[in-house]
Amino acid sequence: MHVNGQTEIYPIIFLSIVLVIALVSDMRVYKIPNMLTYPGMALALIFHAVSNGTSGFLFSALGLMVGTGIFLFPFIFGFMGAGDAKLMGTVGAVLGVRGVLNACVFTAIAGGVLAMILLLLHNRNFKFISRYAVAVSASIAERRFIWVPPAEKEVKPKVYYALAIAAGTLYTVCWKAAFYSFPL
């Protein structure tokens, strides 16, 4: 991703376009299409291989595996969709291991901020806090997990995690462009 200390702009433009398309798709149909992530991964692998040979290919392939791998666990446990994991794999294929690790940290921060905003906007009456407090105290008293269901049917807000991925990744890219190194 570097030539003579300069960040190559083409992979960053490409990644930015992929992130914007993923975000729009996620917000429209709540899905990040394979027709975006798989070609994104392939093009990043090819770009790095052509630019830097075997070391470029390994840079991209390891980033892809780490990015997908980190988000694979939340997918397996049902906290996010497979498209989110594949999108982070695409980020890894472009940014490499160190870049995707930084992007994951800032994506998690952005995701936390997004979740807090959704909680504040969606649950203005904060009834859920008392329900969770009852569940925690009952679980502690019984020494086992006790779920306390809501009194009325809850409508859960949709979390467009592509927004957090885009924000965390673009923050990482901007930091690297400004300071010539990743923040972490």
Image (cartoon, helix red, strand yellow):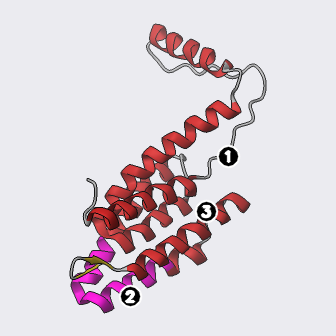
Q: CA gap, disc 1 to disc 2? A: 35 Å
Residue 44 on the magenta span: yes
Q: Residue furthest right?
A: 152
Q: Earlier in the sequence, mark 1 or mark 3?
A: 3
| Magenta part, dominant SS | helix
| Percent position of residue 157, x then y | 69, 41
Q: Quadrant of residue 49?
A: bottom left
Q: Is residue 172 left or right of residue 57?
A: right
Residue at 50%, 21% in the rendered image: 145
* Rendering coords of residue 97 (x, y %): 29, 65
Q: Is residue 73 above or below residue 175?
A: above
Residue at image location 67% in from the left, 65% down from the top: 25
Mark in front: 2 vs 3:
3
Q: Which residue is mark 1?
A: 158
At x 57%, y 75%, the residue is 36
**Where, by quadrant of the figure, is residue 68 drawn?**
bottom left
